[in-house]
Image (cartoon, rainbow, N blue to C red):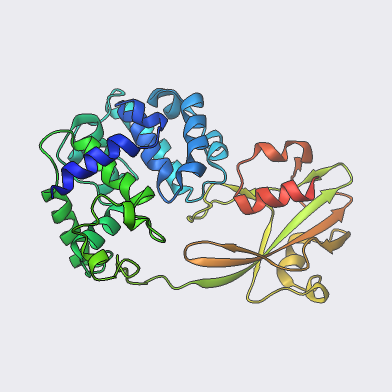
Amino acid sequence: MNFTKILIYWYSEHKRELPWRETRNPYCIWLSEIIMQQTQIKQGLPYYEDFVANFPTVFDLAIAKESTILKLWQGLGYYSRARNLHFSAKYIVSELNGEFPKTYKELLKLKGVGDYTASAIASICYNEPAAVVDGNVYRVLSRFFGIEVPINSTQGIKKFKSLAQSLLPKNNIGDYNQAIMEFGATQCKPKTPNCKICPLNATCVALQFDRIAELSVKISKTKISKKYFNFLVFVSESNKTILEQRKEKGIWQYLYQFPLIETSESLLHENFKNNNDVITYINGADYSFSLFNETEIVHKLSHQHLYTKFWVLKVKELPRTGIDITKIKSYPVPVLISRFIDRFNF
């Protein structure tokens, strides 16, 4: 059985029709790969289409305002991807005269581009023999060859990269890379793969030994922390509120949010006015307050869970400079804040 040829043939029959598969333009391939990281196709596709419509070339992306890019990215999460995208676009325009890097090694110099993304662009656009290894590829190779080495261990990363590289065909490298990724996404799925119709089922080690559910193996390293967020939602008599831009590094860097008070435990209604951070922020202003959500909204991120309350403060005048409430939806905000804005309906 020729593993590689079977996957390429399977791909020709079953691949999904996607806009970035209709081009070899490295800019479009790059956009699609960055947007689709940690993102399902059905969620990422509208974002890809919006980005291409708003920034049809790398020059358009380079001169765009960061706030505009972050606003378009809103809801995708992992906002560092958008910031890296913008940084690299400016680098390509200013340092490379708008010419996209044409080799795996040169692509790795772009901020936010790692082994997988560089391999994908180099193989799809330039037919360079660079194997892609993502979660889907790990799973397909683990199951077919019966590999138990953890995919996120140093040994595993080297082993799977070497194996993937050895399986590359001499031609149609980009098609093969897309084939194995597509196969993992739609056929050899993490749960409930349809092994009965799998073209590789005759020699799949995991299927033969009933180990489909066990492979691939991943070491759990992430310790989830719990944080308590209290957002102060000001509403003044002149119909203004306060949004602040996050400057510190983190997933929400440069996004806007309501003033945030972080506490070590859930802040209770009866303790709100006596909280020192609240007192400092209010700065002596008269206000009335109410709790928008009695039950905390739990916003789950990869490394932390945010237990969130929105406190609505009605004031005559804001304690500091604010914005007109009618303009609030023009600011790039985390999806947690966006959902509140929609529900609160200023």
| Quarter of the figure with residue 21 | top left
Above or below for 336 versus 90: below
Quarter of the C terminus within the rendering = top right
Q: Is residue 12 left or right of residue 302?
A: left
- Give the image location of residue 345, x and y in percent: 79, 46
Residue 119 seen in the current view: no
Above or below for 162 versus 85: below
Q: Is residue 135 left or right of residue 71?
A: left
- Give the image location of residue 251, x and y in percent: 49, 54
- Give the image location of residue 316, x and y in percent: 89, 50
Which residue: 14% across, 49% down? 165
Which residue: 24% across, 47% down? 132
Please give the count of numbered marks on the rendered protein: 0
Q: Is residue 301 left or right of residue 35?
A: right
- Give the image location of residue 276, x and y in percent: 73, 71
246 and 68: which is toward the camera: 68
Which residue: 76% across, 50% down? 343
Residue 104 seen in the current view: yes
182 and 87: which is toward the camera: 182
158 and 313: which is toward the camera: 158
Above or below for 196 versus 177: below
Above or below for 91 versus 234: above
Which residue: 17% across, 51% down? 164
